[in-house]
Image (spheres, rainbow, N blue to C red):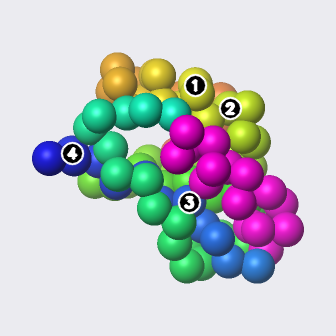
């Protein structure tokens, strides 16, 4: 059973910023403890592509497809947030 759900916004603004490629990158990376889902707007337009890891409530902003393996390896497999990609609105440094 999956312990985490990764939501990748697929609404207009995030898609224009490359969210479809981010979703595809997550779908090609294997993480046995996570479910990957495209979702509707996460309400953070202009900061995408947005990625939200639940139930952790960890938000990643402006995610590029080449950063997805780092999120999978570090966060989904090891349980450590990728500090460089954290959305500062919800994760101030």
From the viewer's perspective, is residue 93 above or below residue 1? above
| Residue stretch in magenta | 13-28
Tell me the residue that label 3 is attached to: 8
Tag shown at residue 3:
4
Q: Which residue is found at the position 75% from the left and 42% from the top? A: 64
From the viewer's perspective, is residue 47 above or below residue 83? below
The span from disc 1 to disc 2 (Cα, nearest Å) is 5 Å
SS for callout 4 = loop
Tag shown at residue 70:
1
Residue 19 among those drawn in magenta: yes
The span from disc 4 to disc 1 (Cα, nearest Å) is 19 Å
Tell me the residue that label 2 is attached to: 67
Residue 29 in view here: yes
Marked residue nearer the N-terminal end (4 or 1): 4
Q: Position of residue 68 (x, y in %)?
A: 61, 35
Do tag 2 and tag 4 residues touch (Cβ < 8 Å)?
A: no
Marked residue nearer the N-terminal end (2 or 4): 4
SS for callout 2 = helix
**Please, what is the dominant secondary structure of the magenta stretch?**
helix
Q: Which residue is found at the position 51% from the left and 34% from the top? A: 29
Marked residue nearer the N-terminal end (3 or 4): 4
The span from disc 2 to disc 4 (Cα, nearest Å) is 21 Å
Q: Position of residue 55 (x, y in %)?
A: 28, 53
Q: Quadrant of residue 9?
A: bottom right
Q: Position of residue 71 (x, y in %)?
A: 53, 32
Give the class, few, some or many, for how many residues have Cα within 10 Å of label 2's Cα (few <14, many ≥20). some
The span from disc 3 to disc 1 (Cα, nearest Å) is 15 Å
Residue 85 located left or right of residue 75? right
Marked residue nearer the N-terminal end (3 or 1): 3
Marked residue nearer the N-terminal end (3 or 2): 3
Residue 51 among those drawn in magenta: no
Which residue ends up furthest to the left in the rendered image? 1
């Amino acid at each position: 059973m999956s312990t985490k759900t990764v939501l990748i916004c697929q609404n207009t603004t995030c898609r224009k910023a490359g969210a479809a490629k981010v979703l595809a990158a997550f779908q090609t990376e294997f993480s046995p403890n996570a479910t990957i889902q495209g979702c509707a707007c996460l309400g953070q337009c202009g900061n995408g592509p947005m990625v939200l890891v639940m139930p952790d409530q960890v938000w990643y902003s402006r995610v590029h497809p080449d950063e997805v393996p780092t999120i999978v390896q570090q966060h989904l497999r090891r349980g450590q947030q990728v500090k460089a990609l954290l959305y500062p609105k919800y994760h101030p440094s």
